[in-house]
Amino acid sequence: MATGVIAGATVGAIAGAIGMIAGAIFGGVVGMAAGHRLVRDDARASGHDADLDHTIGVSGGDMGAASANQPHGLRGANPATSARNTP
């Protein structure tokens, strides 16, 4: 918000004292709106990352462990060994 106030006042200074005041008010409002949007987007991204971490096992599970219903390898071998035998 402070950056918006300063930027608005600086641009508004071209029009004089009244422009400086109006610019500071407008800049403050725009800065506050931008800050609110950034906080909201960061919270949403953090929630998404937490869900994804839980899904892949980074938090609350075994990272990289195969699920119980993992299909067999392409050649009928264990999936861990078939990955090493691929051309």
Image: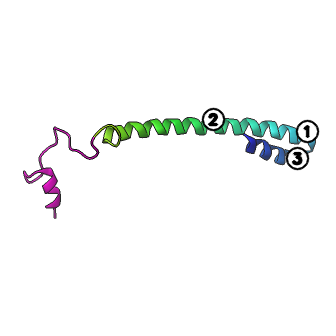
Query: Which residue is the site of mark 2?
Result: 36
Magenta residues (range):
62-87
**SS category of the residue bearing label 2:** helix
Q: Earlier in the sequence, mark 1 or mark 2?
A: 1
The three-letter code of the residue at mark 2 reads His
Query: Colour scheme used in the picture?
Result: rainbow
- Image position of 40 (left or right of 65): right
- Where residue 49 sits: x, y (%)? 42, 40
Q: Position of residue 72 (x, y in %)?
A: 11, 46
- Of circles 3 and 2, the one toward us is 2
* Of 60 and 72, the residue lying toward us: 60
Label for residue 13?
3
Is 71 a magenta residue?
yes
How many residues crowd mark 3 within 10 Å: few (<14), some (14–19), many (20+)? some
Q: Label 1: which residue?
A: 18
**Amino acid under label 3?**
Ala
- At mark 3, the secondary structure is helix
